[in-house]
Amino acid sequence: MPMYSEKVMDHFMNPRNVGEIEDADGIGEEGNPVCGDMMTFYIKVKDNRLEDVKFQTFGCGAAVAVSSIVSEMAKGKTLEEALTITPSLVAHELEGLPKNKYHCSNLGAQALRKAIRDYAQKRGITIKGLEMKGEQDEEGEES
């Protein structure tokens, strides 16, 4: 059994911001077919800030804890600030994750990023930092 930090256990036992935003401004879904974890992030944006962030996660304790901490880290931030949330930042914020659970921190950051991308596409806007970090962009180059 991998050892989890108290912070991971706390966020797993008492996850923050669980749920769905009915009229979400952006929705991002990320999954890992290998472990079966699925995360969906919902964002509400007001004045370029993440006014609300909610998530639904089906997966292991680490996946739930990651979703919870990512939602807390993102809430109240500008869209640009939220895009700086990286997997290593998430793992650090949770005071470490077991090596075999590190991929969970990727999912949280990616699901949030996809929700922000969804928001940007619906509004036809460009957000600084959305096209970075060597991730493949399904839509190809942005002009």
Image: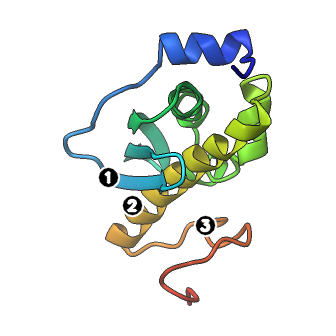
Q: Which mark is residue 25?
A: 1
Residue that protrudes farthest toward the left in the picture: 22
Left or right side of 53 for 85: right
* Crowdedness near tag 2: few (<14), some (14–19) or many (≥20) residues, C-alpha within 10 Å: many
Quadrant in which residue 58 is drawn: top left
Q: What is the residue that sits farthest to the front in this orientation?
A: 1
Q: How far apart are marks 3 and 1 (CA)?
A: 16 Å
Q: In the image, is residue 55 above or below residue 79?
A: above
User: Residue under circle 3?
Assistant: 130
State whether residue 125 is above or below residue 2.
below
Above or below: residue 127 compared with residue 71: below
Of marks 2 and 1, which one's residue comes earlier in the chain? 1
Element under label 2?
helix
Query: Of marks 3 and 2, which one's residue comes earlier in the chain?
Result: 2
Of residues 81 and 139, the one drawn nearer to the viewer in this rendering: 139
Indicate the position of residue 100 as horizontal and vertical percent values.
Answer: 72, 39
Asked if the residue at tag 1 contacts the one at tag 2, i.e. Cβ–Cβ closer than 8 Å, the answer is yes
Name the element at disc 1: loop
Q: Give the x, y percent position of residue 50.
A: 47, 41
On the picture, is 58 further left or further right than 20? Answer: right
The residue sitting at 41% across, 25% down in the picture is 17
Residue found 39% across the figure and 46% down from its top: 40
Task: Give the amino acid type for the residue marked by disc 2 in the picture.
Answer: Tyr
Q: Pointer 2: what residue?
A: 119
Q: What residue type is labelled 3?
A: Leu
